Image (cartoon, helix red, strand yellow):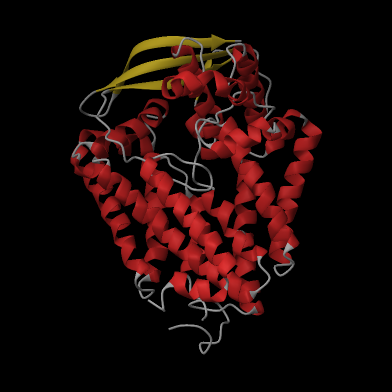
Amino acid sequence: MTARYVFEAIGRKVLGRWVFGFIVVFLLYRFASNAFTHQLASPVLKFAWVDLAYWMVHLLRLPEMITGHLAVSIVFDLLLFTSAVLSAVFVNKRIFPIAFGVLFALYFLTYNSFSAHHTHCMAGILLVSIPFWFKSDKSFSFLWEGLRYFTLWIYFSAFLWKLFRGALFHLDQGYAVFLNETANYIVQAPDSFWGKTYSYFIANPDLATVFVAAGVIAQAAFIIGFFTRKLDWLWFILPILFHTISYCFLGVFFFELLVLNFTLLPPPLTPPSVGGR
Amino acid sequence: MKNTYFHRLYQHSKSLFWLVAAFCFFTLTLNFTGDEVTPFFVWGMFSEKFEPKVEQEIIEIRIDGDVFNYYTELNNVNRHMLISPIGYYHSIIENNNEDPTRSFFRSKTGSMYPKIEPFLNQVTNEPEIKEAFEAWVRRYLEHSCNKPINTLDIYLKTYRFDSQGKPSEVKAEKLFSL
């Protein structure tokens, strides 16, 4: 029994370069966003809510230790960034993806707690290194295939949540969400291109409803991916469109999640005789 | 059946199978309960019913007397790190200076609350955090703007949107000044 595709060492290497290269770019973006731990200026307000992972790190005082001392936070950030770079360069040296995975989990929990919002945008980066922790190419391939299902689940479960909580049948949902998310921008920059665009959408609420409805229908379609890989190109494109539109119209920055799109690409340099269809 | 992912995975490695199965089990269970424990994520963003509110609350920041436009001056991640904690700080003030996480657990755990309170104290914010937080806003803003700040005023303003999407201020509440 094999995974749908079995990555051999060279295929895994090419994939690792792309994945960790993507991660390095987004870490640089976070650095430019003053979001590395040494740039957080020793934050004090924490937000663990009911998530036990946040409880655990705060009970161990790890976020406080990392951000509370400039020297510690600089060392932490250097280790995080270096582990990502080394993971991209030495893909088959498993110590680097493992180190990156552990450090990024700490970063994920620290940033989300001190930003007082448990954002999911970094969830893809949190999980994508895990297959690279395994030595066997078959184990890697199985976990990579599993990550593809997880990617489909993200969008399909987002649809299920809107279905079961009733938002799907709530005609004012699009307009209400749109007004809620863009009000701040309109107030701050009313005469800018986006300020005028948002005002136009508020004046024409049916447009916002159509946009959100189209997005929800697209999310529902992801269930097809559980049964066939033939439309993977579509599941690759849709999240890019989805997050670009969300960013432009709702100010929701989820581009980091696109690292999971790599699971939807056909594996590089894999002999067609190995693995499935 | 033999071609399913889980069957093939089980044939390959039983330990890996149980690892993946446990991940799926916790993800599905927590989705049913509506709670989230990282990394078992719940993707329910924008799924609750929103009613259109023509009045919206906006955080306004004034640096040295001038309005600081954090939408044009800061990128998304930087802005989120600044504005979201101010929103949570406001929710603490609104909740009689008690961290809403504590209130939530008190209402949900009943007589069990005293047992978890010592742990809760370590993962939530004390009322005395106020001054330290306000100083942090100044520090982080100075770092983000790369300039010293002499005076800082944070307001929570309420705007009413007309049918053309034009906002007009109806209320202003000062959250704090430094």
Q: Residue B17 appears at what percent x and percent y?
A: 53, 66
Q: Which picture quadrant has residue A170? A: top left
Q: In the image, B91: left or right of A43? A: left
Nearer to us in this view, A275 or B65: A275
> Is residue B151 in view from this perspective?
no
Q: Is residue A250 left or right of residue B146?
A: left
Vertical placement of residue B156 versus A91, above or below: above
Q: In which quarter of the image is the C terminus of chain A?
A: bottom left
Residue A149 placement (x, y as % from top left):
44, 63
Please name whichever residue, A128 or B168, is drawn nearer the observer in this view of the structure. A128
Q: Which residue is drawn at 76% across and 46% down?
A: A78
The residue at 71%/50% (across/down) is: A81
Is residue B109 among what the camera can see?
yes
Count up the numbered dots: 0
Vertically, is B155 above or below B21?
A: above
- Outermost residue on the right side: it is A71
- Expressed as whole percent of the image width and height from the top left, the position of residue B55 reads 29, 21
Instruction: Specify whether A217 is left or right of A187.
Output: left
